[in-house]
Image: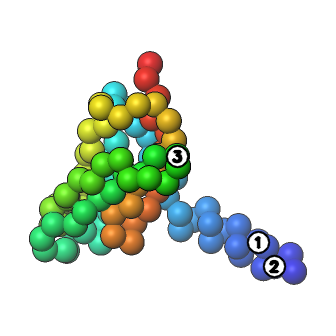
């Protein structure tokens, strides 16, 4: 039993990326699967009540799948972002 718990702990901490950091109202994400994707992918931002608040089209093919998303118009709070199979949570706060 302890062996499986250890494997699960290692899997979570090595495979799940850390929560992204929002700096100056901008969120930088890395979605490696979009590096080889052609065309637009909708990126949806959900608020704390799991309601979509913004849909941003991201164009595939960017080097290493790195994107910067501006969040200046969103109020402070907890959000989640989904872009294809990539999903992450983040907190938006103002200084």
- The secondary element bearing badge 1 is classed as helix
- Asked if residue 54 lies left or right of residue 63, the reply is right
Q: How many marks?
A: 3
Image location (x, y in percent) of residue 47: 46, 46
- Counting residues from the start of the chain, the first of labels 1 and 3 encountered is 1
Q: Nearer the viewer, mark 1 or mark 3?
A: 3
Asked whether the viewer can see residue 89, the reply is: no
Q: Secondary structure at mark 2?
A: helix
Residue 89 versus residue 3 in the image, above or below = above
**What numbered label is drawn on residue 48?**
3
Label ID, residue 3:
2
| Residue name at image x 20 percent, y 59 percent | 58
- How far apart marks 2 and 3 lie (CA) works out to 35 Å
**Frontmost residue, 68 versus 49:** 49
Q: CA distance from mark 1 to mark 3?
A: 31 Å
The percent position of residue 52, horizontal first and vertical second, equals 38, 53
Indicate the quadrant containing the C terminus: top left, top right, bottom left or bottom right: top left
Distance in Å between CA atoms under marks 2 and 1? 5 Å
Mark 2 and mark 1 in contact? Answer it, CB < 8 Å: yes
| Residue 28 spot, x, y in % from top left | 32, 46
Residue pointed to by mark 1: 6
């Amino acid at each position: 039993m302890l062996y499986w718990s250890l494997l699960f702990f290692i899997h979570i901490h090595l495979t799940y990326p850390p929560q992204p950091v929002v700096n100056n109202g901008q969120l930088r994400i890395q979605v490696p699967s979009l590096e080889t994707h052609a065309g637009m992918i909708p990126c949806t931002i959900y608020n704390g009540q799991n309601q979509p608040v913004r849909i941003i089209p991201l164009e595939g093919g960017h080097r290493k799948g790195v994107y910067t998303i501006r969040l200046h118009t969103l109020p402070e709070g907890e959000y989640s972002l989904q872009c294809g199979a990539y999903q992450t949570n983040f907190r938006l706060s103002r200084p």
